[in-house]
Image (cartoon, rainbow, N blue to C red):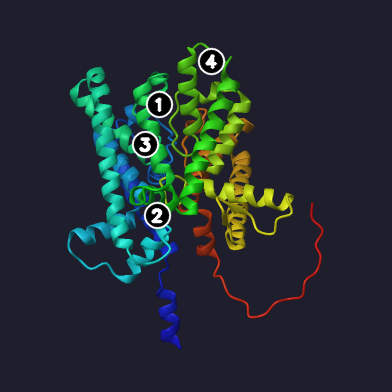
Amino acid sequence: MYVSFIRKKRRVTPPILIAGSFLITIFIGTLLLKLPFATTIPITWTNALFTATSATTVTGLSVFDIGSTLTLFGEIVLLTLIQIGGVGLMAFAVAILMILGRKVGMKNRIFLQESFSQQSLGGTVRFLRSILIFVFVTEGLAFIILSFFWVPEFGLKQGLYYSLFHVISAFNNAGFSLFPDNLMGFAGDFPVTLILSSLFIIGGLGFTVVMEVIAKQSPKQWSLHTKIMLAGTLTVNLIATFLLFVLEYHNMKTIGSMSIGDKVLTSYFQAVTPRTAGFNMVAMGDMENSSLLLTLLLMFIGGGSASTASGIKLTTFIVIVVATLAYFRGMTEPHLFKRTIKSEIIFRSLAIAAVSSMLVFTAFFLLTITETLPFLPLLLETMSAFGTVGLSVGITGNLSPIGEWILCAVMFLGRIGPLTLFFLLIRPKKESFKYSYDRVHTG
């Protein structure tokens, strides 16, 4: 009996592995960023922890200017944390085993299945291999293309380095930039806008979606998840672009003084970046309050499952909307693309939204106690941390140490996901009985 208890205690589940891998990466990153030669000026342990957490969770929030505070070594540490955080430490660990010719055990296969939302264990190692090839090929091609534009502008060495840094940051939806004003200097720049936005949109779709589109060229063969992600991404991006274009059209502090073409281009970039990319081409603090509220919603929605993005996930949001519309239409089972959505998925989506809302509210409530900053900027900062977005109106550097710790926790929980947190805290159990029904008045 004692041996059985010990075995149960030592059992490591995929959620624990996921959370543990992120914590280990954050801890190592904090130590490396605190080294004297990692920064041009001394930083506190809290600042090092915040930056390491922000990079590992591919958030992009920063309490100091990255380009002027970090040395080349510090920036390389940051890039490494971003790349590992985007794909996952355990995924890289399994990849190393594959390179060394070692056998990938059942535990690692189960972890990969959990990390990349695979339906079965079969082909998980092959799927990981395809993902890593896709990641590095995509980043490599984008690096070459962006270099053609930035090398003539910044010189060979600096142009290549800027291109590499921003490509990795964009694909992994990190939003870190080496420029003091992020990407505001490139507002209306078509090549930069197209290249970087394409990277974080692809990264935010989810590896499952990308691999399925590559493997199955015919849309008829795509799964419901892939169809929802592609159609949903296109729809949300178009609606958000139109709304931001209208809301900011006359705002002289953002896009008001631009040409029509540049207004559309910049509105598009600002519409797609809140779903966890974190770059900005206009000053967030100068945007209309209505635009900031729309940005809050987009950050809460986030990207796709098994992607470099966070938030409640686009599919979760769409399932809730479809289920709500089905209820108002008197339908017992909601359907989309001629496929029925199981009640289990609806309950799961509602649970994710509820847990996420409670997490954001709790963190925001605590920050209103510890900080003396304005209401809306503080809410934006909290939502940005949860969605691992990195957009800010410039108050991150004014947070107290306690405020930084709170946002560190939010970034971590936002990256591992509310369901992973749920499985870490609660052990689900199956009931062999049912209670009688009774009425509950709602609404």
Residue that mark 4 sits on: 253
Amino acid found under the numbered disc labelled 4: Lys
Compare residues 242 and 39 and report the one nearer the observer. Answer: 242
* Mark with earlier residue (3, 1): 1
| Separation of residues labelled 4 and 1 (CA atoms) | 16 Å
Q: Amino acid at mark 1?
A: Asn
- Which of the two discs, 2 and 4, labels the residue nearer the N terminus? 2
Tell me the mark number nearer the camera, choosing from 3 and 1: 3
Q: CA distance from mark 2 to mark 4?
A: 40 Å
Drawn side of residue 337 relative to residue 173, left or right? right
For disc 2, the neighbor class at 10 Å (few under 14, some 14 to 19, many from 20) is: some
- Secondary structure found at label 3: helix
Q: Residues within 10 Å of mark 1 (few under 14, many from 20)?
A: many
Residue of label 1: 182
Local SS, label 4: loop
Q: Residue at x 70, y 77 (%)?
A: 434
Q: Is residue 368 left or right of residue 3?
A: right
- Report, in whole angstroms, how far the alpha carbon at label 2 lies from the one at label 3: 26 Å
Circle 3: residue type: Leu
Residue at (59, 63) in percent of width and height:
344
| Residue picked out by circle 3 | 199
Q: Choose the circle earlier in sequence order: 4 or 1.
A: 1
Q: Nearer the viewer, mark 2 or mark 4?
A: 4
Q: x, y percentage for residue 398?
A: 51, 31
Q: Is residue 424 above or below residue 7?
A: above
The disc label shown at residue 23, or none: 2
Task: Please tell me in which quadrant of the rendered image residue 76 appears.
Answer: top left
Q: Element under label 2?
A: helix
Nearer the N terminus, badge 2 or badge 3? 2
Asked if one can make out residue 380 in the rendered structure from this viewpoint, the answer is yes
Picture coordinates of residue 281 (x, y %)? 44, 24
Q: Nearer the viewer, residue 21 or 216?
A: 216
